[in-house]
Image (cartoon, helix red, strand yellow):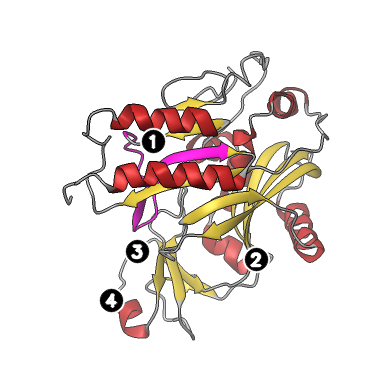
Amino acid sequence: MAFLSWDPRVDDSVFSTSGAYRDVVTSSNSTVPLMDKDAFGLYPAYQELYNKLKVARFAGIASSLIGSAQKPRKYPAIVRPVYNLYGMSYETYKITVPSEFEKFNKPGYFWSEFLTGGHFSWDLALANGDIKWRKTWIGQPHPCKSPGVMSHWATREASPASERSVEHWVKSNLAGFTGMINLETIGGRVIECHLRVGDSLYLGNPDLLQSMVDLYEKGTWSFQESMEDFYIIPIWISRNLDVCWPKKPGAKESVLDIVKSNFNVWSIEVEDDWPANPVSMKRIMFLGCTELSKGKEAASRIQSIFDSESYAEK
């Protein structure tokens, strides 16, 4: 057994690294989770780290269960599930006024204060609880301003204060853990934890992926290379629409040609029925490149092709 749920070494019609991962070697000794549904069962001793209410309280973020007597003292506030193994801010709501909050009645959800500041994603390699490598990404919010919807993610160094906060969090919560983890922070405070790698899987660096495999198999980490800046650009469509490939002749072929000509790595999710999407938008593509301006121009052309299609309301 090696990668769980899917194998990133295999290029197909959905996921491609342009062959970059084809020579990564695994053995029967390695079990590498790439999705939360697998990681949750793989690490029973650390399952409570998926409890987002517990994570919020550890970070000193004002929060409480929906249905409790404690209400937000100021707005906006965030409401979301205590546990979410789907990812992508699934069922996360921004509540703007008390009357809206009073109508929100979903057991198993909690509210937390609305945080400001940079939204970072942290990929960390841990060996027996010690951080051996890190890669940080900052999200650029989408104009729709819906929680979890980003225009793009960019590799970017976080502040020293945020680094110290994350190091303290790891030391306090992941003693003895070996493997990849992904943390998300807003304004330097940890808001959630995933016991698997995040967007760094899309960097398309075979030496990095091999080091991840070796971490699970041998408990050692070797990758320390510097890498050029990298960007991930999602393509979004309204969740109210019944999205499929555009019906216009040649439209699908045009989109795929733009993708293959401008991006190093891509995930095509047009026909994906995985429910992991924000409340307002559905992600249909996840595109990685080293030149942001070129990538944004290509993504804009792809977006225009989909936006020109007449989709039915769900």
Residue 58 badge:
2
Residue under numbered circle 3: 107
Which region of the structure is painted magenta?
Answer: 271-288
Q: Residue at x 34, y 36 (%)?
A: 270
Q: Nearer the viewer, mark 4 or mark 3?
A: 4
Q: Nearer the viewer, mark 2 or mark 4?
A: 4
197 vs 104, nearest the viewer: 197
Residue under numbered circle 1: 269
Please tell me whether residue 283 belongs to the stretch shown in magenta.
yes
Q: Nearer the viewer, mark 1 or mark 3?
A: 1
Residue 103 badge:
4
The crowding category of the residue bearing disc 4, from other C-alpha atoms within 10 Å (few below 14, some 14 to 19, many at least 20), is: few
Residue type at tag 4: Lys
Looking at the rendered structure, the secondary structure element under dot 3 is: loop
The crowding category of the residue bearing disc 2, from other C-alpha atoms within 10 Å (few below 14, some 14 to 19, many at least 20), is: some
Residue type at tag 1: Glu
Looking at the rendered structure, the secondary structure element under dot 2 is: helix
> Residue 12 occupies which quadrant of the picture?
top left
Looking at the rendered structure, the secondary structure element under dot 1 is: loop
Q: Earlier in the sequence, mark 3 or mark 2?
A: 2
Is 86 on the left-hand or right-hand side of 183?
A: left
Find the distance from the CA under tag 1 to the CA under tag 2.
Answer: 35 Å
Find the distance from the CA under tag 4 to the CA under tag 3.
Answer: 13 Å
